[in-house]
Image (cartoon, helix red, strand yellow):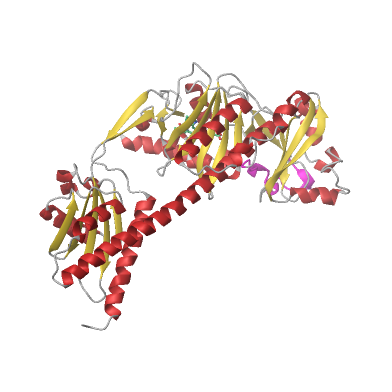
Amino acid sequence: SEQPLQGFIDECEREQLHLTRFVQPFGLLLAGAAGDARIRHLSNNSIAWLGRQPDALLGLPLTDLFPEFPPGATDSDQAVRWMYPNPDKQLFPALCSGPAGLLDGWLSCNDNNWLLELEPALPASQHLAAYRPIPHRLFRMPSSESEWTRYCQFLADNLLEATGFERVMIYRFRDDDSGEVMTESLEPGLEPYLGLRYPASDIPKIARDLYLANSHRQIPDRRAKPVAILNATDPGGTDPDETGSHLLDLSLSDLRAASPVHLEYLKNMDVTASLSFSVVVGERLWGLIACHHRKPRELPLPLRERCVAMCQAFSMAISGFQGTRRLIELSNSEEDITRLHEAMRQADEDYAQGRETDATPALGDLLLELVSASGAALVDGDSLISFGQAPEPAAIHAQVDWLLGQSQEPIFATDHLAGLFPPARAQIDHASGLLAVRVRHFGDPGERVFLWWRPEQPQTVTWAGDPRKSALRDQGQHMLSPRASFEHWVETTTAHSEPWSNSDLLRARKFRSLLLRDINADLLAPRR
Ligand code: BLA
């Protein structure tokens, strides 16, 4: 049943991912409070990375450890300035060396704390790969659908090559936060995931929010043993609780240990290494670019950053493409509405002068084309005129009565009328979706209602696993776990039409303002 699942999902949403007490072992974490250079937290792998005991490092000012830090700083005050909140991370190539060789440093600082993460420096053998300019084609905005499709494939293919992963997917979130693999590049022999749908619960909101703050996330080996974070017991001689040491915020950390539920998910998907990049458009997480590998795979920071730059070019290309399309659509809608308006005036004039009108058929076509509908009607009190494939007059009046009693909204749209108004089930063939626009004369109690319908369009969605079973309760351990099966599950929706797009709604709004303008003109005109 639905109820327990909702409980599981809520539980996913409650997992405070950024407050985990562990990091992944592919580097060393040093951390402290914003504005204070003392090391208050340290991952318990400093012997491996720096050849130093944790006790020798905790409590020490970072500037003692790295006198040159940051490069160019002449005194420690200046160095400390780097440890104030900053939206950008600072890269310190070859900051220091340890038993495993040269290390790169990566410094971030939010309102709470700074993090310095050390990782193996880029080996010389990979300089070529990391410092290659990113393909200039990625900076050319696509302007047509076909260019857009080619752009996406070009990006996925390039990332497959640049990362050396076996599979790269452009994963796009839908309005309900479920997502779809819209482009895929993969090594031969692997099963394609292209076109598959995944439920919103596969990536909880708290995880998606972390992608807004971070450009990417690397999990080089899901089986690697996480490393605990140690706290200074008494840095500076104050009560440890007052140091806030229990509140280390790993939101900006690259090393942050992965959630056990997600590690299980990767295992169930037969993935060992995962690397994903965020695609942010207009402050919203538009999607992720997810890379999979069945063997462990780790990329040095500069190589990851090169991929990040490609994904950021992609984010801008999306904005550019959407902007261009909106402009074209705006000017098309302007033209369509002007033509419709002319036809309405003509019909009106002919009617007022008692002439036979030849504008009505054209008017019908234009009304239908305005929002790509198959049927339309105008209802003004008891009078009704309909065009195309419209329901019977009695059914239209019933819809209008329901609509007027139901909301005050001047524009109403649904792709599933029968779900809201069950009597409409009888008309799903040609009227599964309804778009309605209401216009009222000042001082007139009545309203004119324009209605448009769209026919039923049965839709099948192939989910990677039954979304109703997206989370399971492990019987023995009472632990939450993700679904074990990604077996295709086909959902067919009936009594739905093609949804009304933003552009359809824009056209409806513009149409309505034109009508309102006419009404006002009528009011202001001298009474005949
Ligand atoms: C994180 N889930 C993620 C991430 C992805 C997905 C991409 C980001 C981390 C990463 O890149 O590995 C999901 N991965 C997918 C999907 C595809 C893919 C949909 O490749 C499609 C092809 N997951 C569950 C359930 C829960 C859950 C039921 O299925 C909650 C109980 C949690 N997913 C979950 C958590 C994270 C996550 C907690 C964050 C992991 C982390 O950052 O530590």
Q: Residue furthest right?
A: 74
The quarter of the image holding the C terminus is bottom left
User: x, y (%) of residue 376?
Assistant: 22, 54
Q: Residue at coordinates 45% horizontally, 23% vertically from top-left? A: 192
**As drawn, is 278 to the left or to the right of 479?**
right
Residue 109 is at least partly visible in this image = no
Q: Does 301 appear in magenta?
A: no
Residue 464 seen in the current view? yes
Q: Is residue 163 above or below residue 362?
A: above
- The correct choice, above or below, for 16 with respect to 380 in the image is above
Whole-percent x, y for residue 485 in the image: 40, 23
| Quarter of the image that includes the N terminus | top left
Pick whichever, 337 or 198, lies toward us.
337
Q: Residue 300 in the image: x percent, y percent?
A: 69, 29
Image-quadrant location for residue 402: bottom left
The residues colored magenta run 233-251
> With respect to residue 300, does 443 lie above or below?
below
Query: Toward which corner of the image does residue 297 lie, by quadrant?
Result: top right
Q: For this rendering, which residue is in front, 492 or 329?
A: 329
Q: Residue at x 76, y 33 (%)?
A: 104
Q: Is residue 235 magenta?
A: yes
At 63% from the left and 40% from the top, the residue drawn is 250
Q: How many marks?
A: 0
Give the image location of residue 521, x and y in percent: 30, 76
Task: Name the residue rendered at 78%, 51% in the picture.
Answer: 81
